[in-house]
Image (cartoon, rainbow, N blue to C red):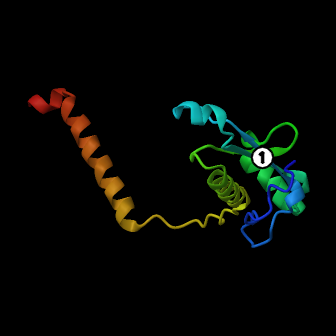
Amino acid sequence: MSDGAGAGLPPVLLPDGRAVPEHALAERADTSGGPGGQHANRTASRIELRLFVAAAGLREPERQRIFERLGSRITQAGELVVSVGDSRSQLQNRHAARKRMEGLLAEGLEVAAPRRRTRVPRGVINRIRENKKQQSAKKRARTWRPEDDL
């Protein structure tokens, strides 16, 4: 867990405006890989933010939706993990990690609108019929019949 690391940082918000409790979040700083020379090798600027889904203050249907939609991103311990190392600044990476977590939660909690069946327009049906007639005539023209020679 983070030792007061969340102090001064914006809360992680759910799409309906509720804040995720800080005790449900764990933050860890690590050295980021890639280019950057000695700075990247010595500075713990990459942030790994973990959300304990069971302690996130979600209602049961919301929790199920999160596990269904984001199941591949959730660890066996029930943690949703986001890792950010885009910036050289640890603070900027912390802010970015929280924003990314909010985006993931919004994606996971989004309820798809029910599909409404619509009628196929008459023009589309007529176009399909005309195409079938043309195809049929094309194929018929390829075959030879003895009565054609008379």
Where disc 1 sits, the SS reads: strand
Residue pointed to by mark 1: 80
Image position, residue 83 (x, y; %): 68, 43
Image position, residue 36 (x, y; %): 52, 35
Residue at image x 78%, y 53%? Answer: 66
Q: 67 or 5: nearer the eye? A: 5
Image position, residue 15 (x, y; %): 72, 68
Q: Quadrant of the rendered structure where residue 42 is?
A: top right
149 relative position to 131: left or right: left
Q: Residue furthest left?
A: 150
Establish if 42 lies above or below 64.
above
Image position, residue 68 (x, y; %): 77, 48
Residue at image x 80%, y 68%? Answer: 19
Q: Quadrant of the rendered structure where residue 4 is?
A: bottom right
Residue at image x 69%, y 40%? Answer: 44
Q: Quadrant of the C terminus?
A: top left
Mark 1, Cα crowd under 10 Å, few <14 / some 14-19 / many 20+, is many
80 relative position to 83: left or right: right
Count of marks overlaid on the render: 1
Q: 124 or 85: nearer the eye? A: 85
Residue at image x 87%, y 47%? Answer: 1
Q: Amino acid at mark 1?
A: Leu
Q: 122 or 92: nearer the eye? A: 92
Q: Residue furthest bottom?
A: 17
47 relative position to 88: left or right: right
